[in-house]
Image (tube, grey):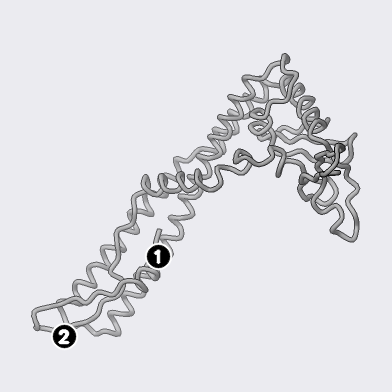
């Protein structure tokens, strides 16, 4: 949404009259605020285009998923013996050798990460029904947007009122020889109010967008977990990406898998 000040900078309009009063250049004559549905559609499209979520965008599915238990940094992939038959891809802390105090966390192979997930998944399957019910309750609490929608509606109404007042004084200034100091003062006050309310509007629409996004994540989590059963013995990338928030590695005997639903599983 464009601010009044930016519109002001790009738009100067001379308002003409029939000669009864002096002519003035009027700045800040602005467009109406976009409606909430249009804003939301644009936000969703921008979100969809913004990399299509890096975890699904063709990069390694383990990127930004493995966290170092020492420094809190992320693991990244490294290639060992890249030009020989012993070539091997491993994952280790990206800051392992960058700090004065070297991280002691171990490197992992893809197969080790997959086995960590399968072990955690089996625990989650045992607790599946309870976990799904907890997620549903969390979704109801976290994703409720009725208050935000009411606030959004009131802010739109307030913006439109301010907008009408701005249009009114601009029109009046084109018809009557107003005191320009007083006119500019009144205009600046309205512009300041408009910007203040616009900022609040952007904040509440972002809360609505994030709540809807989180609701979709909860729904996806439930759908994926419902598919899981104890017959799963092979790594499933969709389940990995849909269920796991991140994995914290302290050492190979101290690993914590954090699921998107809030459950943590020691492996």
- Which residue ends up furthest to the top in the rendered image? 231
The local crowd at label 2, few if under 14, some if 14 to 19, many if 20 or more residues have their Cα within 10 Å, is some
Q: Is residue 175 above or below residue 33?
A: below
Question: Image check: 161 left or right of 58?
Answer: left
Quadrant of the snapshot with the C terminus? top right
The local crowd at label 1, few if under 14, some if 14 to 19, many if 20 or more residues have their Cα within 10 Å, is some
Are dots 1 and 2 in contact, CB under 8 Å? no
- Which residue ends up furthest to the front in the rendered image? 84
Where is mark 2, residue-wise? 22
SS of the residue at dot 1? Answer: loop
Q: How far across and how far down the image is residue 51, in percent?
A: 56, 46
Q: Residue at x 55, y 42 (%)?
A: 52
Question: Image check: 162 left or right of 229?
Answer: left
Quadrant of the snapshot with the N terminus? bottom left
Q: How far across and how far down the image is residue 144, in percent?
A: 50, 38
Real-space Cα separation, disc 1 to disc 2, in angstroms = 29 Å
Is residue 78 or residue 74 the one in the foreground? Answer: 78
Where is mark 1, residue-wise? 3
Q: How far across and how far down the image is residue 261, in percent?
A: 66, 33
Mark 1 or mark 2: whose residue is earlier in sequence: 1
**Which disc is residue 146 wearing?**
none
Q: Residue at x 81, y 46 (%)?
A: 68
Is residue 13 or residue 166 the one in the foreground? Answer: 13
Q: Is residue 45 above or below residue 139?
A: below
Q: Residue at x 31, y 80 (%)?
A: 184
Picture quadrant where residue 11 is located: bottom left
Is residue 15 or residue 112 the one in the foreground? Answer: 112
Picture quadrant where residue 241 is located: top right
Picture quadrant where residue 80 is located: top right
SS of the residue at dot 2? Answer: loop
Q: Residue at x 66, y 31 (%)?
A: 243
């Amino acid at each position: 949404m464009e601010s009044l000040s930016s519109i002001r900078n790009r738009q100067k309009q001379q308002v003409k009259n029939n000669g009864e009063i002096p002519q003035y250049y009027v700045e800040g004559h602005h467009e109406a605020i976009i409606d909430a549905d249009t804003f939301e559609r644009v936000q969703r499209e921008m979100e969809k285009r913004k990399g299509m979520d890096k975890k699904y965008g063709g990069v390694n599915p383990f990127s930004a998923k493995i966290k170092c238990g020492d420094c809190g940094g992320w693991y990244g992939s490294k290639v060992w013996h890249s030009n020989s038959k012993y070539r091997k891809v491993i994952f280790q802390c990206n800051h392992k050798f960058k700090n004065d105090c070297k991280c002691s966390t171990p490197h992992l192979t893809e197969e080790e990460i997959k086995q960590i997930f399968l072990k955690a998944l089996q625990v989650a399957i045992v607790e599946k029904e309870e976990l799904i019910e907890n997620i549903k309750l969390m979704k109801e609490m976290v994703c409720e947007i009725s208050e935000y929608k009411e606030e959004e509606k009131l802010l739109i109404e307030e913006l439109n009122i301010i907008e009408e007042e701005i249009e009114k004084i601009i029109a009046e200034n084109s018809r009557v020889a107003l005191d320009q100091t007083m006119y500019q003062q009144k205009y600046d006050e309205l512009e300041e109010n408009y910007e203040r309310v616009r900022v609040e509007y952007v904040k509440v629409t972002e809360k609505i967008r994030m709540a809807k996004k989180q609701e979709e994540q909860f729904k996806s989590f439930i759908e994926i977990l419902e598919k899981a059963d104890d017959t799963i013995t092979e790594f499933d990338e969709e389940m990995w990406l849909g269920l796991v928030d991140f994995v914290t590695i302290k050492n190979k005997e101290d690993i914590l898998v954090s699921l998107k639903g809030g459950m943590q599983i020691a492996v």
